[in-house]
Amino acid sequence: MSKPKYKIHHDFKLNGFHYSRTHLRKVAYSFIKEGLPYEERLGNFLLDWLNDDYDDIKVRTSGSTGEPKIIFIPKQRMINSALATGKHFKINEGTKALMCLPAKHIGGMMMMVRAMSLGWHLDLVKPVSNPLDDVYKTYDFCAMTPFQLDNSLNRLHLIKKLIVGGGHISENLKMMVQGIPTKIYETFGMTETVSHIAARKVNNRKSGKIETGPFKVLPKISVSADENSRLIIKAPKLLDQPLLTNDVVEIESYKKFYWKGRYDNVINSGGVKIHPEEVERKLQKLITQRFFLSGMPDDALGEKVVLFVELPFSEKTISDLREAIDKLKVLSKYEKPKKIYLVEKFEETSNGKVNRERTISGQMV
């Protein structure tokens, strides 16, 4: 009988119990037959992982930057990513971790791979918006989306280190997590890079001021930019070749960068290039619900900045909002929206991210 290709760490535990490969396969079958939907998805992933006839895992991309697609990620690259995370955040065997992300996306899959590869003691909870509500013990490590973080503020003391991915953390949310003991990191990555390839700390317990430093890449990864300031990721342990992304960045060094926005979202207004994501960060203190900026054709400027706000609209009137925006000194005249649309419900990708293109199309019909 041949040895398994992908070993389970001797210290790995799931929901308090250590499992051999054979017993873990039985747990997977039990999840599929008797578990809740999120457990069924995890069970299917575990069976795929434990099947040594296949060296790849089928993963669906989120669709936040284009049409969702199916890609196949080698299991060894997932292990390499797990090892890099463990080294970067100094979390190795015996780590008590909480999994509250669905196993149908790369973020959830990687929490399980990290646990099996690094020897974590992993507990599962339902991947809901408020995952800590029924948690009554402390954990060394956890991964959440920004939405889950927003709904877990009063129970964050249960988590020592928290990584947040799947979207950017708003300035308002960053302000709300200052001064707390939990170390919170915003991550940068995508399905193609096998989860995150960089992270930066966003909160400071002592000063209470938002950390504004660059993203720092994980071990054995380096970054650069092309002539259009688009990020290039070099990660031999994760990628066959350097990956050119559509993320516009400012490179500080081959290990550090600042994220500016998406190249495909850039608005050219009167010859001035505007990154919507940068302007959105400036507007977050004024608008409490979901919103985004985009460019629309304009006879004089070529493109004009347009603001889309999701209902219910909490500000008094559009006129009030426009007046408040006009008073913002941090906005240039080109950055100020020329038109505001109120949208009943934003279109979303399969994992809950705002689909800007489809939302805009829905307003133009």
Image: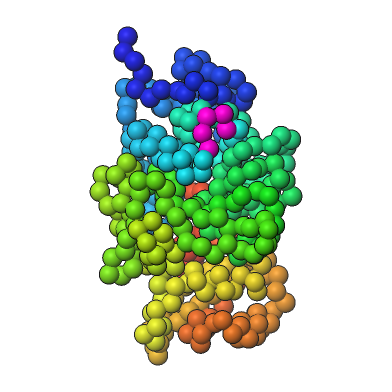
Q: Residue at x 74, y 35 (%)?
A: 136
Residue 349 point in image, percent of width and height: 48, 53
Residue furthest out toward the front: 206
Residue 187 point in image, percent of width and height: 49, 52
Of residues 11 and 49, the one nearer the viewer is: 11
- Name above or below for residue 59 compared with residue 148: above
Secondary structure that dominates the magenta span: loop
Number of marks present in the image shown:
0
Q: Residue at x 38, y 56 (%)?
A: 255
Left or right: 356 in relation to 152 = left
Residue 256 counted in the magenta span: no
Q: Is residue 69 visible?
A: no
Residue 45 point in image, percent of width and height: 45, 30
Q: How is the image coloured?
A: rainbow
Left or right: 95 in relation to 261 = right
Q: Quadrant of the N terminus?
A: top left
Span highlighted in magenta in the image: 91-95
Residue 30 point in image, percent of width and height: 55, 20
Q: Is residue 185 visible?
A: yes
Residue furthest out toward the bottom: 300
Q: Residue at x 62, y 60 (%)?
A: 174
Q: Quadrant of residue 325?
A: bottom right
Residue 94 counted in the magenta span: yes
Q: Residue at x 59, y 40 (%)?
A: 141
Residue furthest out toward the left: 241
Q: Quadrant of residue 13?
A: top right
- Name above or below for residue 26 compared with residue 70: above
